[in-house]
């Protein structure tokens, strides 16, 4: 059954079959009438292509489209929405094929004597069918299983990034303090991993615990270690936290695929949406040098 649509075609092509040669063609048309002009109609008239030609003609007829095949200035064949006589139907095997004139009949007869193989593609090369009326067909990517934030390498590059405008902010630069190993010490002491002036000798510690969490622990007892403005004694850090240590202000960052505060690495479903439980994470065995 034909739908409410119109076609506009302007296609030029060349095709070649080993042992036979090359043929060129032009497909043009507007509305529901298409013209196919080919340099050699015998190329597509072989016996092994007959089934594909009948299939194409039937599909065109269902859509109300007529395709006229022309060689030079002579009309040879009509496919699709056309009318063929009873005798032609007996010969072609389809009521949607109409041979026009003696030259069209000769072209079909000569083509059927060719010994070359099939030229037209089989159904395995045709695009998938679409909903009717015609609608775009999209190449949908395969559905991927949801991943987990439990990085087996316990990575995610956790770090403290000095906030713009913070005490000690260098003009035109950026300061990043990677949080490596099982324990990162912060203070003014000479043995601290992150040395910052104006702090206690050992002001705070960031621990990478057995659950693969980064935990900020205050060691100063001065209530100047804060996360998002709130004084803390011990607090698990999450990406985006604002960390204040004395007069210094940092942003904590860890790649979301390893930040366990986001189940399955994202916010899909909304903050209040149901989140599928993740499998148990691999715990970190304590070592001298860290995980």
Image (tube, rainbow, N blue to C red):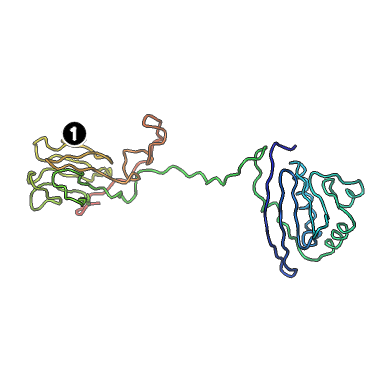
Q: Residue at the right extreme?
A: 87
Q: Residue at the top extreme?
A: 272
Q: Is residue 227 above or below residue 80?
A: above
Report which residue position mark 1 lands on.
Answer: 229
Residue 220 or residue 100, whichever sits in front:
100
- Secondary structure state at the residue bearing disc 1: loop
Q: Residue at the front extreme?
A: 73
**Residue at point 38%, 36% (across, down):** 267
Q: Is residue 101 left or right of residue 205?
A: right
Q: Please provide percent x and percent y for residue 96.
A: 82, 46
Residue 121 or residue 88, whichever sits in front:
88
> Residue 112 occupies which quadrant of the picture?
bottom right
Q: Please provide percent x and percent y for residue 236.
A: 24, 38
Q: Please provide percent x and percent y for residue 89.
A: 88, 48
**Residue at point 35%, 41% (across, down):** 280
Q: How many marks?
A: 1
**Residue at point 17%, 42% (across, down):** 249
Q: Is residue 268 left or right of residue 236?
A: right
Q: Pointer 1: residues within 10 angstroms few (<14), some, or many (20+)?
A: few
Q: Is residue 192 left or right of residue 29?
A: left
Q: Please provide percent x and percent y for residue 164.
A: 20, 44
Q: Is residue 256 above or below residue 36?
A: above
Q: Is residue 189 left or right of residue 119?
A: left
- Quarter containing the N terminus: top right
């Amino acid at each position: 059954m034909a739908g409410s649509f119109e076609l506009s075609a302007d296609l030029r092509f060349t095709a070649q079959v080993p042992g036979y040669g090359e043929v060129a063609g032009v497909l043009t048309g507007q509305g529901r009438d298409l013209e196919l002009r080919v340099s050699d109609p015998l190329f597509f008239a072989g016996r092994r292509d007959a089934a594909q030609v009948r299939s194409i003609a039937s599909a065109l007829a269902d859509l109300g489209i007529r395709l006229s095949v022309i060689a030079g200035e002579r009309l040879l064949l009509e496919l699709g929405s056309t009318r063929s006589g009873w005798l032609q139907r007996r010969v072609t095997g389809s009521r949607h094929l109409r041979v026009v004139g003696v030259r069209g009949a000769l072209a079909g007869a000569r083509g059927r004597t060719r010994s070359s193989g099939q030229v037209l593609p089989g159904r395995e090369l045709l695009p998938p069918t679409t909903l009717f009326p015609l609608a775009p067909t999209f190449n949908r990517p395969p559905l991927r299983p949801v991943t987990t934030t439990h990085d087996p390498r316990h990575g995610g590059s956790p770090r403290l990034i000095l906030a713009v405008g913070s005490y000690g902010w260098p003009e035109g630069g950026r300061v990043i303090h990677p949080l490596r190993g099982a324990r990162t010490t912060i203070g003014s002491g000479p043995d601290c991993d992150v040395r910052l002036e104006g702090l206690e000798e050992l002001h705070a510690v960031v621990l990478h615990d057995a659950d693969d969490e980064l935990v900020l622990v205050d060691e100063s007892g001065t209530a100047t270690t804060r996360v998002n403005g709130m004084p803390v004694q011990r607090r698990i850090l999450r990406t985006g936290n604002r960390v204040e240590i004395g007069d210094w202000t940092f942003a904590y960052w860890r790649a979301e695929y390893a930040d366990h505060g986001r189940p399955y690495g994202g916010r899909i479903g909304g903050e209040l949406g149901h989140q599928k439980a993740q499998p148990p994470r691999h715990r970190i065995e304590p070592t001298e040098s860290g995980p």
